Image (cartoon, rainbow, N blue to C red):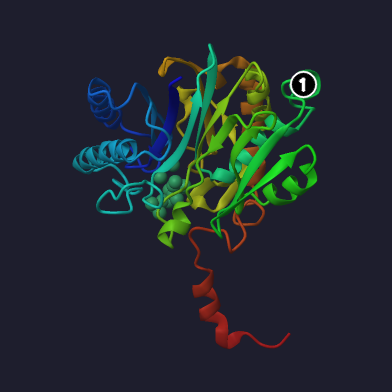
Amino acid sequence: MVKTTISVIKADIGGLAGHHVVHPRLKEVSVAELTAAKKDGLIEDFYVTAVGDDLQLIMTHRKGVDNPEIHELAWNVFSKGTEVAKQLGLYGAGQDLLKDAFSGNLKGMGPGVAEMEFEERPSDPVIVFMADKTEPGAFNLPIFRTFADPFNTAGLVIDPRLHEGFIFEIMDVFEDKVVEMSSPEEMYDILALIGTTGRYVIRRVFRKSDREIAAVVSTTRLSLIAGKYVGKDDPVAIVRAQSGFPALGEVLEPYTLPHLVAGWMRGSHNGPLMPVGEKDARPTRFDGPPRVIALGFQIKNSKLIGPSDLFSDVAFDEARRLANVIADYMRRHGPFMPHRLGPEEMEYTTLPKVLEKIKERLKEA
Ligand code: F6R
Ligand code: MG
Ligand code: MG
């Protein structure tokens, strides 16, 4: 049985009107490149979209995860796009391409990557989440709720195929280490880690009964890779749904709470994660608020059937309204924590300069 791989690879290679949206020309260039790659048989199918200033390549193929040819294809698409971005004078052209030349794998090179390989079920629904103005840990809360919270996911209680629970692979993005933890037995320990969203990030989820892959999140931290701020590490995630996995509605339900995430304005503020349709993934207010879109596909013979733009549903209107109320409330804190992040987490900071300036005047209290 052939296995299908779905690779979601994204980069901010330039914004229209600042860190706002992707210019349509960049999507056109990507579609042209990926059409050629499909014709050549390198990939089976693709869908190109954008959330805020991040260009998103959703691809299916039969080459497995971490495949150098697929990574190189994405790198080349982003490089071609960067040339166009430069011609158009787009803002931050090529900002997420941190290296001059491709060297085998995108890890550490700037673009964000989420990939999973699986044997297709007769009908295989997959949801691709893409977020802007936030970080990979933003998915900790909703992914935990989908795969471990019985108040969210009815199937954990009443569907025998989900009842054993799920295994969470959690990454310490500072130390570059991973640990597998089992839910429900280790639920409190899992939460003790993943509540620290800037450091411990859910990277993959497996069904416990057969270790089938259920979810994967991109865990690239641009700021840490480059050793300095070069752009937000806006994350993507892939989640499988139905018949033995959480239902589509159980995967989407956590986003009815626009929970607070880091990454708003200058990567240095907390704000609500607003679920929106593709057409509304256009952050403006204080460069935000942070957005997430969700596209639903069926995977058939390695082809992408769809998508359906899931958060465009009116059922998420209240979440958006609440996100706007929370955005107002948070904004009124101005430069104060917890709207502004703590000093160790900010991506821009004048604090060392201020401390230097007052150093002589600092006296014993
Ligand atoms: C970028 C982001 C934005 C920028 C801000 C300042 O993803 O989050 O809020 O940080 O617009 O950008 P610069 O420093 O490029 O003027
Ligand atoms: Mg940007
Ligand atoms: Mg972005």
Three-letter code for the amino acid on which mark 1 is drawn = Ala
Is 147 left, or right, of 61 in this rendering?
A: right
Q: Nearer the viewer, residue 200 or 87?
A: 200
* Disc 1 target residue: 154
Name the spot of residue 17 as percent of width and height, x first: 34, 39
Q: Nearer the viewer, residue 258 or 75?
A: 75
Q: Residue 207: x percent and y percent?
A: 66, 30
Image point (33%, 53%), residue name: 98
**Percent position (x, y) of residue 290?**
54, 38
Q: Nearer the viewer, residue 76 or 210?
A: 210
Ligand 3 neighbours mark 1 (CB distance < 8 Å) = no
Work out whether residue 236 can be spotted: yes
Q: Residue at x 28, y 27 (%)?
A: 42
Is residue 259 in view from this perspective?
Answer: no
In terms of secondary structure, where does tag 1 sit?
Answer: loop
Q: Which residue appears at 40% of the width and 38% of the height? A: 10
Q: Is residue 315 above or below residue 99?
A: above
**Side of 54 where 251 appears, left or right:** right
